[in-house]
Image (spheres, grey):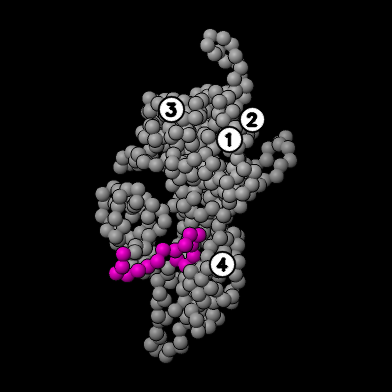
Amino acid sequence: MPTNILMPALSPTMTEGKLASWRKKEGDRIKAGDVIAEIETDKATMEVEAVDEGVLARIAVPAGTEGVKVNTVIAVLADEGEDPKAIGAAGAAAPKAAPAAAPTPAPAAAGPRPTASAAPPATIVHGGDHVFASPLAKRMAQQAGIDLKSLKGSGPHGRVVKADIDRALSGGAPARPPAAVPAVAPTPPAAMPVPSAPPPVAGMPAFDEVPVSQMRRVIARRLAESKRDAPHFYLSVDCRIDALLKLRADLNGRAPKEGPGAYKLSVNDFVIKAAALALIKVPAANAMWTEQGVRRFKSADISVAVAIPDGLITPIVRGAENKGLAAISAEMKDLAERARAGKLRLEEFQGGTFSISNLGMYGIREFYAVINPPQACILSVGAGEQRPVVKDGALAVATVMTCTLSTDHRVVDGAIGAEFMAAFKKLIEDPLQMML
């Protein structure tokens, strides 16, 4: 029977995406693991790999189509021995002719199942100990102490997805798997409607209008929702970083120049480590708002903002409180390089507990970042610059870095935010404490 290839959900927040390009054309033979298409999501342009073998009988959604809903049929794969030309518009083998008096309807094709994913698919094992679940659902279940085997997944083929974990956390009954849907290929979706631009007015200079990408559109929507729904408030501290700069120079001077042990620490590596340790000292700040309650996390998974073409992505340094500065530096360098190349895996930029945005390298002295939902805090880091300070009652010059914490007041009250910033400032100004 022919198999429908569905528009995959490549991130938990993805409801639709742009089918950027097809790597295969109709009639091509497909093997498991072949890259068949590129999908532009709210985070990046990602390659989609096939998990079934066969012949690409029909492409239902052409390249360049925007606003393609998740689980929409985008192509049809013919099985071995089937004639690709015999695959009808409905994605099933064309029925044989029947007597006019009693026409026989075409048999229903097998229900659609996703055949492409940015992450390696889970294995279905009936009657065994393995559970068919998405990587995000597995991580959420592990953090919440939920036994996946006790849940009935609502995803394709009973796959446990994020919504099932959310229902379990809220005390609701697990959803039953939906009934199979006949494999009917819909009409290719129309492009996402774009609000009409204001007409040019007299005196307006010439301009170029750059089309808005799917990533930029989703960033705009999510940050607007964050600013609207999360009551932001801000706390700033000035950190003297002369001791940190001295320690950084000393450690970099001792580092091998090349080889597996080579490293070059940045100020941002110290900031990541200090923020992680401060979150462990003040766990009430390492939290997230939900309608069921406030989730306080036991590990500091630090999302670090990285600028990429036409957007922003936040790769995660997981368990940063347990990693040394050299390990954080090497991991952050690797994550940033692959983020700019669009090669991050889903779990590498989804699920952090706290964010850092550093604009110091651009000379920005101070700024107020918008919270990265569903997290409750983001730390804005400015440039280190020499400023006049009072030390022991006398005027002196010190290198000062202004850091501002944006917090969701539903989760982090002023006293908690102030306690976190005090712990962070102490670590930054006395960096040897991070080595203990």
State how far apart marks 4 and 3 are (Cα).
49 Å
User: Measured from the top left, where is residue 192 in percent x and y?
Assistant: 54, 54
Residue 137's quadrant in the figure? Answer: bottom left
Gap in Å between the C-alphas at discs 1 and 3?
Answer: 23 Å
The quadrant holding residue 255 is: top right
Nearer the N terminus, badge 4 or badge 3? 4
Look at mark 4 in the image and give the residue it sits on.
36
Residue 181, located in which quarter of the rendered image? bottom left
User: How many residues crowd mark 4 within 10 Å: few (<14), some (14–19), many (20+)?
Assistant: some
Residue 133 versus residue 97: which sits nearer the camera? 133
Q: Which residues are magenta?
A: 114-129
- Which mark lies nearer to you, 2 or 1? 1
> What residue do we see at 36% from left, 41% from top?
298
* Magenta stretch: dominant secondary structure: loop
Q: Which mark is residue 363?
A: 2
Label 3 near label 1: C-beta < 8 Å? no
- Residue 338 position, x and y percent, is 58, 51
Report the residue marked by disc 3. Answer: 423
At label 1, which amino acid type do we have? Leu
Quadrant of the image containing the C terminus = top left
Please name the residue shown 55% across and 57% down the image.
46
Helix, strand or loop status at disc 3: helix
Circles 2, 1 touching at the beta carbon (< 8 Å): no
For label 1, the crowd category at 10 Å Cα-Cα, with few meaning under 14, some 14 to 19 and many 20 or more, is: some
For discs 2 and 4, the disc positioned in front in the rendered view: 2
Callout 4 secondary element: strand
- Mark carried by residue 251: 1
- Of badges 4 and 1, nearer the viewer stands 1
> Mark 2 vs mark 3: which is more N-terminal?
2
Please identify, in this view, whether the residue under mark 2 or under mark 3 is nearer the observer.
Answer: 3
Of 289 and 123, nearer the camera is 123
Q: Amino acid at mark 3?
A: Ala
